[in-house]
Image (cartoon, rainbow, N blue to C red):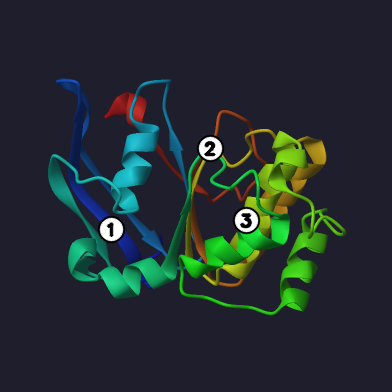
Amino acid sequence: MSENTPSLLTSENLECTRDDRLLFNGLGFQLGRGEVLQIEGPNGSGKTSLLRILSGLRRADDGSVKWRGVEIQHARDDYYSSMVYIGHLTCIKADLTTLENIRILLDTRSSSVSVRTIEQALAKVGLAGFEDVTAKALSSGQRRRVLLAFLLLADARLWILDEPLTALDVKGVDLMESMILEHRESGGSVIFTTHHGMQLPCDMKSVDLGKC
């Protein structure tokens, strides 16, 4: 991050344990507008735990996470309206249609958009014509694409993504990469984990939990 780029999200001296085992400690980083950060590390190093801490779903054992200089627990309204977290498991309901699932996801953000806008997002992620198909009839990759459509509609400045390439085919991986690049170029910021290689900016930042 350049000196002229104000930080949006800052972690300071984060520590996390699981089952009495230290996963990481002394972890700190800053993420500014239009920056991309990859969280790296071997299995069991705490990548998902870190993302849950950053998204406010888990408290760190020590340290703090700040949004625009304020600890996230004291900036809840601003932070949660500006951030969207998507875990590595699809969080859609099997008996609901694609359209209904997206409406429910948007409801969690107190957001509402027109059917036409949802259709446009679905078309962009390769799901045109699947609006009324129940999620249980979709493939794993198509369910993941439902979440990508939600990302496009969420209007969030910060994306926190845990293994966003899960179940995606080659075209889906290309789509995810292009979405991250477009989000970055529009001033959005992204934090993600992945076991797969991605074609992203050479100035992308990284944190290796295997070294924390």
Residue at x 65% of width, y 39% of height: 198
Compared with residue 28, is residue 73 higher up or lower down, i.e. above or below? below
Label 3 vs 1, first from the N-terminus: 1
Distance from label 3 to label 1 (Cα)?
20 Å
Amino acid type, residue under disc 2 in the picture: Leu
- In the rendering, at what x and y percent does residue 32 appear? 40, 64
The residue to which callout 1 is attached is 10
Closer to the camera: disc 2 or disc 1?
2
If the image is split into quadrants, where does the N terminus sit? bottom left
Please name the residue that numbered disc 3 is placed on.
180
Callout 2 secondary element: loop
Q: Name the residue under label 2.
A: 89
Q: Residues within 10 Å of mark 1 (few under 14, many from 20)?
A: many
Question: Where is residue 115 shown, x and y percent of the image?
Answer: 73, 75
Q: Which of marks 2 and 1 is nearer the N terminus?
A: 1
On the image, the x and y values in percent for residue 26 come to 18, 38
Res. 82 in view: yes
The one nearer the camera, 112 or 32, is: 112
9 vs 173, left or right, is left
Which badge, 2 or 3, comes first in the chain's sequence? 2
Q: Position of residue 162 (x, y in %)?
A: 49, 41
Q: Which amino acid does label 3 sit on?
A: Ile
- Nearest the eye: 187 or 93: 93
Above or below residue 99? Residue 204 is above
| Image quadrant assignment for residue 196 | top right
